[in-house]
Image: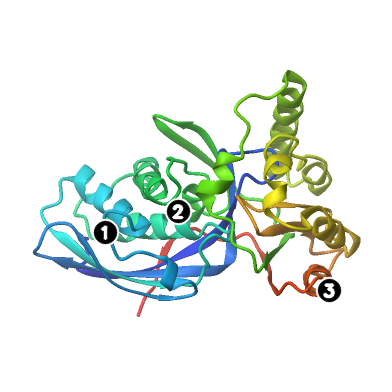
Amino acid sequence: MALDRAIVRAPSTIANVGPGFDVFGIALEEPSDRIEVRRTSEPGVRVESIVGVGAYAVTLDNTKNTAAVAASKVLSVAGADFGISMRIDKGIRPSSGMGSSGASAAGGAYAANLLLERPLDMNMLISCASFGEEASSGSRHADNAAPALMGGFTIIRSNEPMDVMRLDPPKDLGIVACLPEFAVPTREARKRVPKTVPMHDVVHQVGHASSLVAGMATGDMGLIARSLDDVIVEPARAPLVPFLKDAERAAVSAGAFASFLGGSGPCIAAFFDRREADGLVIAKAVQDFYEGHGVECFCWNTTWGAGCERVMQ
């Protein structure tokens, strides 16, 4: 049954996940955004307010706001005869590499879908959310929006038509996400991606991406650990994140089995086995490293999580 009002929680995500540029993504249990929508008689989507972390950096313009663009696309595809008023509470800092715009886009699409008499299917929702991402980064990509909507670990087989698969990662997979006080705009980070790459790097990337999927599907932490190396995109983006490799080494020295650049950065993600390592120790190691270089750093000790969900009040 269609709703007149809904509040949605949209999770943070880490895109790329090592070798899977624009293909892989994983949803985090925390942090998250909240989006409230209401039906209106006036057509279109109007963003009434934005509060929370980095709200000053998010536009109220409904033609440029990622959540509004995604919601508008849902209404357009569905042929809806109503409009939406929207309030956004940001829990994910923009330009963080933790899927801030992806959460907004996914949350906007998911919330709009709750108001429809005939909701769109998941692949169509992800496609609508990718238009919101385009408003933020300048290019359509769904590697944040897909896990934000579906949860777990997602694989984008195709963008046209949208075709996304979801896997449950191992239940004991811990994730530390560290956010040093740098800003890396996604538009700038995408400019660093090389246009051509040597064939031996392509072979390396395909092999590691394939084995990462196998590791996620079978729950093989060792295989996941061996499969997270990215020789194409992370090296090109590393100059945008000072001390990146040193911070990754600090995480591994403290117990993580792998560490890599989260999305476009500056987030540094670390995977660990919760049966064998302590996420708080890993987080403190990265935090201490950055603070030793005069850079404030905030970390989340979390795990993979669910996708967008309605908040009952």
- Asked if the residue under mark 1 is in contact with the one under mark 2, i.e. CB atoms within 8 Å, the reply is no
Q: Amino acid at mark 3?
A: Gly
Q: Residue furthest bottom?
A: 313
Residue shown at 55%/42% (left/top)?
Answer: 190
Q: CA distance from mark 2 to mark 1?
A: 21 Å
Q: Which mark is drawn over residue 292?
A: 3
Is 215 situated above or below 265?
Answer: above
Which of the marked residues, 3 or 1, is nearer the chain's N terminus? 1
Q: Quadrant of the C terminus?
A: bottom left
Mark 3: give few (<14), some (14-19) or many (20+) Cα within 10 Å.
Answer: few
Q: Position of residue 33 (x, y in %)?
A: 46, 68
Q: Give the amino acid at mark 1.
A: Asn
C-alpha span from label 3 to label 1? 42 Å
Question: CB under 8 Å between callouts 3 and 1?
Answer: no
Between 279 and 239, the one lying in front of the other is: 239
Left or right for 72, reference 264 = left
| Number of the label disc, if any, that sits on residue 149 | 2
Q: Quadrant of the N terminus?
A: bottom left
220, above or below 247, in the image:
above
Percent coordinates x, y for residue 279 in the rendering: 78, 69
Amino acid type of disc 2? Leu
